[in-house]
Image: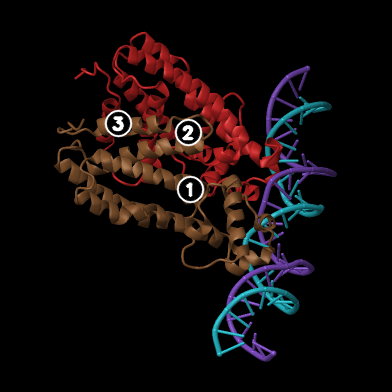
Chain colours: A brown, B red, C purple, D cyan
Amino acid sequence: MTDHDLEIDELMDGDELTDKQKKIIVSAIESFAEKGFSATSTSEIAKKAGVAEGTIFRHYKTKKDLLLAIVAPVMAKFVAPFIIKDLQKVLHQDYEHFEDFLTAMLLNRRDFLVKNLSTVKILVQEIPFHPELKELFKEHIALKVYAQFIKLVEHYQAKGQIMDIPAYSVFRMTFSTIFGYLIARYMILPEADWDDEAETERTIQFIMHGLAGPNHSKK
Amino acid sequence: MTDHDLEIDELMDGDELTDKQKKIIVSAIESFAEKGFSATSTSEIAKKAGVAEGTIFRHYKTKKDLLLAIVAPVMAKFVAPFIIKDLQKVLHQDYEHFEDFLTAMLLNRRDFLVKNLSTVKILVQEIPFHPELKELFKEHIALKVYAQFIKLVEHYQAKGQIMDIPAYSVFRMTFSTIFGYLIARYMILPEADWDDEAETERTIQFIMHGLAGPNHSKK
DNA sequence: TTTAAAAGTGAGTAATCACTCACTAATAGG
DNA sequence: CCTATTAGTGAGTGATTACTCACTTTTAAA
């Protein structure tokens, strides 16, 4: 079922988990992703994990705490690469062209999504209903990722590689296109036969042409 | 709360509804959108509608039937304009350029979305968990909208207005961008102050440049 | 080996769940 | 007006809910 999901150990960094704790998390992820958070009962999770129901509440005060324990680390890991590394690289000419950065980002975040498919599904599904998740999202995505991306865009705009439109529009269009691709590829039609390489290339080119500035003379 | 939502009478075409039935539907829409389908109880809906709980089950055999009664007509209405009218217009040169068609579609579907915000939210939220909804979606979107759009794309490709890439890629990129805009505008950041006209124009231009074929000499 | 903390248990809790049913009230065609 | 159909009711159903707690088992440092 969740074969390709990230090892929970990796995700739940720091605190070591017992076998039963791991089984609880794996089972919860499976059920939450399949039926949704509200439609999943704790008794169901316990049964699937081969654990007494009380064991769940020994480690998580409430059912919602369990959800947060699953979903919060994913958000943190998702934004990690945006925080410093990539920005430094860009500013130090590791990515001379916006296209190079885009490609690197798409491949990188695609791998992450594939490894954490179920968990990301849960996150996306539940965000609208839990203020705590919204807050986490704002903190991580809105502030960190957005702020860094804006700097990046302005950097490439100054070099004339990107059209001179508001950076937030560039942000919106770029992420719409990339996530539109990833959602179609891995969530809506995962079973269709995709030519990933060609599709990725087309997606990047679509963004590049759509945003092309005066000096888009790379080829 | 749902001031700008479509009049239910319009949506529930045909069958006439009593006052209480309307109140049930309005209340259900409100609660489903706010807390999700599973997290909303029928007693809560009844209370909000000022109706006995039994009244709900007089008209809808199950809670899920109530959901379907709310969500199914929206899907039908959403795809309606794609079915014939617009395609005919295009083929009869009402929209000479792909850009004209795109603009018309974006404005048209935006109005629809704004009028049916809550209901569309519910639809999007619940699709993953209800096979019946998935089936309806495939029937309407996948078959009707997709098929028509593909014909359109090939038509404009033949005229050299669109790049010669697979039509399904054009479909994906176009809808990603448009819905990315609408979702950001009306669901993620509805309270931000948007310059709708400028943002719409930029979005269209982004798609047009991204897909530009050999004869993109419109200006 | 002793011992205290941590992990695990499962029967038990009150509350809530979707749904039923015997009944009354309102409606509309003849 | 009569009557049959439909709309509406609300107390009652058993099942399930998230969560508790007194208890046992396991773990690991002293």
In the picture of the structure, the residue carrying the numbered disc 1 is A115
Q: Position of residue A11 (x, y in %)?
A: 48, 58
Query: What chain letter is assigned to the residue under label 2?
Result: B
| Residue B80 visible | no
Q: Nearer the viewer, mark 1 or mark 2?
A: 1
Answer above or below: position of C4 versus A57: below
Q: Are marks 1 and 2 in contact (CB under 8 Å)?
A: no
CA–CA distance in space, label 3 to label 1 = 25 Å
Q: Are marks 3 and 1 in contact (CB under 8 Å)?
A: no
**Looking at the figure, which quarter contains the C terminus of chain B?**
top left
Task: Count every numbered label the image shows and give the total.
Answer: 3
Three-letter code for the amino acid on which mark 2 is drawn: Leu
> Residue A205 has which mark?
3
CA–CA distance in space, label 3 to label 2 = 39 Å
Q: Position of residue B131 (x, y in %)?
A: 62, 35
Q: Position of residue B209 (x, y in %)?
A: 26, 27
